Image (cartoon, rainbow, N blue to C red):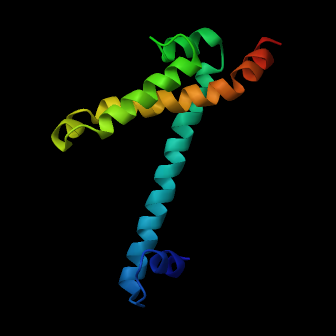
Amino acid sequence: MSEGFASACGYNGNSPALLEAFEAIRQCGIRQARQEHDRRKALIDGLALGEDLFLAAIRPALSAEEAIEDATRFIAFWRNMPRWRQERRLPDLARARQRLLLARFFRRYGRRIWQREAA
């Protein structure tokens, strides 16, 4: 599997040390992706307990649509900032992306989840 990943990254050699390094990089990426997925799933499972928790998470927006608009507006604003200011606002970007992810998920599935939890 490491040969396929290495060639996808542009390495066409056959050095065992470099192939091991590519495999280590691939495994680290897989572990990190799984950890992020588990973190997002835990957050969504916590917010699925009630609509009030979701609304508190996207505050000050009053609906999922409004939260999506706010997050999208901030991301566009962030992209137009100078590089030095972007680096200072990275935590704000991470929060906006998280809010966008939550709002999109609950806009699509929220009613079904909350109805299932209520029953």
Residue at x 37% of width, y 28% of height: 74
Where is 116 relative to 52, above or below? below
Of residue 34 and residue 102, the one placed in the foreground of this image is 102
Q: Position of residue 84 (x, y in %)?
A: 16, 40
Residue at x 50% of width, y 82% of height: 3
Residue 28 in the figure: left or right of residue 104: left
Where is 36 relative to 95, above or below? below
Can residue 43 be seen here? The reply is no
Where is 88 relative to 55, above or below? below
Of residue 97 and residue 71, the one placed in the foreground of this image is 71
Where is 11 relative to 115, above or below? below
Residue at x 55% of width, y 28% of height: 102
Q: Position of residue 105 (x, y in %)?
A: 62, 30
Of residue 51 and residue 46, the one placed in the foreground of this image is 51
Which image quarter is the C terminus in? top right
Q: Position of residue 45 (x, y in %)?
A: 63, 26
Q: Tell me the quarter of the picture where residue 12 sits.
A: bottom left
Q: Position of residue 86 (x, y in %)?
A: 24, 38
Residue 89 in the figure: left or right of residue 33: left
Which image quarter is the N terminus in? bottom right
Point out the residue furthest to the bottom here: 14
Point out the residue furthest to the left here: 84
Residue at x 50% of width, y 74% of height: 5
Q: Tally the marks.
A: 0
